[in-house]
Image (cartoon, rainbow, N blue to C red):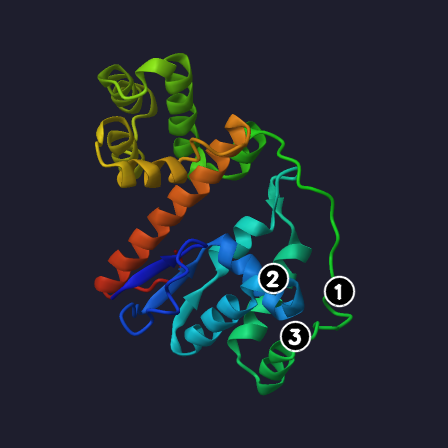
Amino acid sequence: MKIDFLHNKLHNTVKNKCQNIHDSYILDSNIVIKLRSLYYNPESLKNDFDYIKGLWEFFEDKDVLPDFGIRELSWDFSLSDIDVIKYNRMLFAMEGLFEYHIDTIKRIESKKKYINNKFPPVKRGEREFCGLIENMNANPLLLPTFCFLYKFYKEISVKPNEKFSIEVYNEMIRFTIEDLRVVLSYKLIFIIYLLFSEDDEETTYIEKMLKINKEQTEEQKIWNSSWDIFLLRIINEFAVQTLNGISNQNI
């Protein structure tokens, strides 16, 4: 079984669809939010319209899993909980898109807005990030990842000229074994590549995953990269349970 995590950088997916067939596509929040715009207001996509519409058409006979991206996008940092209105609005859009009803197809092709009183546009202020502590309390499954990445950021900020050093690696291993006492395979693999790899492409990929050079606060970087790593765990468990003939319903 082939599972693809589709994020906003994979712009060749539609063009190469004959060579790049997967059984399931897990959608990152970057794709979900574009698909939401395609459903509610296709005109707003402008230069992205053809690509997102082509991606939607490509998905017609595929197994598509948007829920993870929906949950990430609808998370309210100030309440440390799901914003039900945002969640339902995005879920409604995904369900409407993937039904491929002829009226929806015609409306999108003509780039007309979706108008319905049940799910009116929601205008909110910019989301406020309230800090890791509040979000940790609401996300116990992410807690070890938060702790590991927080420690790692502290290590590379304390030793900016020794980022690629064995000292940082040894300290992270000590922290994992003695303090966390949890094996965090993805995180350990990432820092090994980041600290020691001589492959620039690998290093760049890991830096993007860990948000090293992103213009955000340290807490926001840790929060966002924790979600991405958590998604990798879900993909892995999805594949393992599928191969073993176990239901994926509770993942």
Going by the image, does 42 lie left or right of 139? Answer: right
Q: Amino acid at mark 2?
A: Met
Q: Amino acid at mark 1?
A: Pro
Instruction: Count up the numbered dots.
Output: 3
| Front tag of 3 and 2 | 3
To which residue does mark 2 refer?
Answer: 90
Provide the secondary structure element on which disc 2 rests: helix
Q: Quadrant of residue 241?
A: bottom left
Identify the disc placed on residue 142: none
Looking at the image, the residue that sits furthest to the right is: 117
Q: Amino acid at mark 3?
A: Lys
Q: CA distance from mark 1 to mark 3?
A: 18 Å
Identify the disc placed on residue 120: 1
To which residue does mark 3 refer?
Answer: 111
Query: What residue is rendered at 28% in x and 41% in y?
Result: 201
Q: CA distance from mark 2 to mark 1?
A: 12 Å
Q: Looking at the picture, does residue 54 appear above or below residue 250?
A: below
Assign the C terminus to one quadrant of the image: bottom left
Looking at the image, the residue that sits furthest to the bottom is: 102
Indicate the position of residue 240 as horizontal and vertical percent values: 25, 57
Going by the image, does 192 lie left or right of 34? Answer: left
Provide the secondary structure element on which disc 1 rests: loop
Indicate the position of residue 59 as horizontal and vertical percent values: 43, 73
Earlier in the chain: of badge 3 and badge 2, it is 2
Indicate the position of residue 72 as horizontal and vertical percent values: 53, 49
Earlier in the chain: of badge 2 and badge 1, it is 2
Q: Residues within 10 Å of mark 1 (few under 14, many from 20)?
A: few
Q: Quadrant of residue 211?
A: top left
Going by the image, does 52 lie left or right of 112? Answer: left
Q: Are marks 3 and 2 in contact (CB under 8 Å)?
A: no
Assign the N terminus to one quadrant of the image: bottom left
Q: Residues within 10 Å of mark 2 (few under 14, many from 20)?
A: many
